[in-house]
Amino acid sequence: MTATRPDPAGESFADLLGGRRAAIDATLGPLAFGIGFAAAGQSLEWGVAAAIAVSVLVGIWRLTRGDKFGAVLLGLLGVIVAALIALYTGRPEDFFFIRVATNAASALCWAISIALRWPLLGLVVGGVLGQRTAWRRDPALLRAYSRASWVWVGQYAVRLAVWLPLYWTGQIEALSVTSAALTWPLVAACLAVSWYVMRRSLPAGHPGLRHPRTTDEPAKV
């Protein structure tokens, strides 16, 4: 009988990491900003009001669905801070400044983590599974997490490639639409692709994410 490639823990990164509801915050706020901005004759104030109003409603909905108050508050604060920056500078495109900056920083951090052999995907998933850094002493898991983490670097790079030219040229409506299009849909694609890379990287017979085969030293990636 030929060995089959493992199903790591029998669940996907989407199952482990969740985040579907939180992604709604990141999608609807900017979309509401763009709609309010355009509908009111390119009014920054109306765009800000629409974004905050929609984010508050989404937050209330999430609380009624049992989401943690802290997570809901973080989503709302992100929109409020973005709105305050735009109001302070008077530049509507600055509503998206934090979004652009955090994606640039995230791409850099994920790439550095891979180079240092501490891939962030392993730290995140290992934390969720309560393993701390046990996965890092499994050469196969370390290699798989490193390869899958490059997919996440690519996710941030795609956003920057689209958003930076729009931000520099002040294309508010386009920024709003692409912010929605490149949030949850891109995250879903990233989860699926990185999970596929993870599965393909683990050797046949490996017990999966929940059962690292630990050795004394982490292997080279």
Image: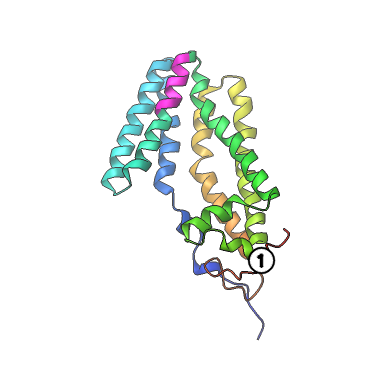
Return the residue found at the far front: 216
Q: Is residue 213 above or below residue 109?
A: below
Please state which of residues 117 and 25 is positioned toward the viewer in this rendering: 117
Identity of the residue drawn at 62% across and 57% down:
145
Q: Which residue position holds label 1?
A: 140
How many numbered marks have been drawn onto this rendered protein structure?
1
The quadrant where residue 101 appears: top right
Query: Which amino acid, mark 1?
Result: Ala
141 on left or right of 58: right
Q: Is residue 201 above or below residue 111?
A: below
| Colouring used for the render | rainbow
Q: Position of residue 73 (x, y in %)?
A: 35, 37
In the picture, which quadrant includes the C terminus? bottom right
Dot 1: few (<14), some (14–19), or many (≥20) neighbours within 10 Å? many
In the picture, which quadrant includes the N terminus? bottom right
Please state which of residues 47 and 142 is positioned toward the viewer in this rendering: 142
Identity of the residue drawn at 59% across and 39% down:
106
Q: Is residue 63 visible?
A: yes
Q: Position of residue 169 (x, y in %)?
A: 61, 19
Q: Is residue 170 above or below residue 152?
A: above
Q: Is residue 32 visible?
A: no
Residue 65 part of the magenta segment: no
12 on left or right of 21: right
Q: Which residues are magenta?
A: 80-88
Return the residue found at the far right: 220
Q: Position of residue 76 (x, y in %)?
A: 37, 33
Query: Element at badge 1?
Result: helix
Q: Position of residue 83 (x, y in %)?
A: 43, 23
